[in-house]
Image (cartoon, rainbow, N blue to C red):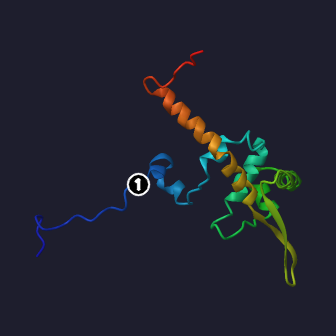
Amino acid sequence: MATASNVVPLKQGAPARQSEKKFGRAVMSHGPYIVPALMLRAQVRLNVNSTQMVVLLQLLDFWWTEDSSAHPSIKTIAERIGLSTKQVQRTVDALVEKGLIGKINRRLPGRGKTSNEYKFDGLIKKLQAIEGDFDKARKAKKAAAKPGGLIANKE
């Protein structure tokens, strides 16, 4: 027979993650979204305007594993961000022209043209190429905050 002294209370669920603490469990139940912070911090270096960044983020939301590709429809992206399909198509074309994404036309047997496939090799290569600059800046900022971190040039 169970008594108060030998009953172990059951956990009421896993402890909330930081994202759940910030946004709430219901909001986070729709899933997290992970992009490198460098992508946001390097927007100017990537030569990407705000519309292009939003479209790029939307495309990345459909890329789930390293060995897969994204293939949302232009219409889906347009509906998500409140732009026309023509505006989204022009923005995608600009991202392709900048070398940030690859676009592959897809056809389904018996159905014809379907949504394009998108690859992000160009974005990844560009982020990897500029990461060193950001790492140096981060280290310099950290060193500057330490006592004696800034030393004037002696000439």
Residue denoted by label 1: 16
Near-viewer residue (48 or 116): 48
Residue 82 at x, y = what percent?
78, 50
* Other-residue count near label 1 (Cα within 10 Å), few / some / many at <14 / 14–19 / ≥20: few
User: Total label count?
Assistant: 1
Report the residue that reaches farthest toward the top.
Answer: 155
Near-viewer residue (123 or 107): 123
Near-viewer residue (52 or 38): 38
Q: Is residue 107 above or below residue 50?
A: below
Residue 7 at x, y = what percent?
16, 67
Q: Is residue 65 above or below residue 90?
A: below
Question: Tag 1: residue type?
Answer: Ala
**Residue drawn at 55 percent across, 32 percent down:** 140
User: Which quarter of the rendered picture does the C terminus lie within?
Assistant: top right
User: Which quarter of the rendered picture does the N terminus lie within?
Assistant: bottom left
Near-viewer residue (100 or 71): 100
Q: Quadrant of residue 78?
A: bottom right
Report the residue that reaches farthest toward the front.
Answer: 155
Report the residue that reaches farthest toward the bottom.
Answer: 110
**Residue drawn at 54 percent across, 31 percent down:** 141
Residue 70 at x, y = what percent?
72, 65
**Residue drawn at 52 percent across, 21 percent down:** 151
SS at circle 1? loop
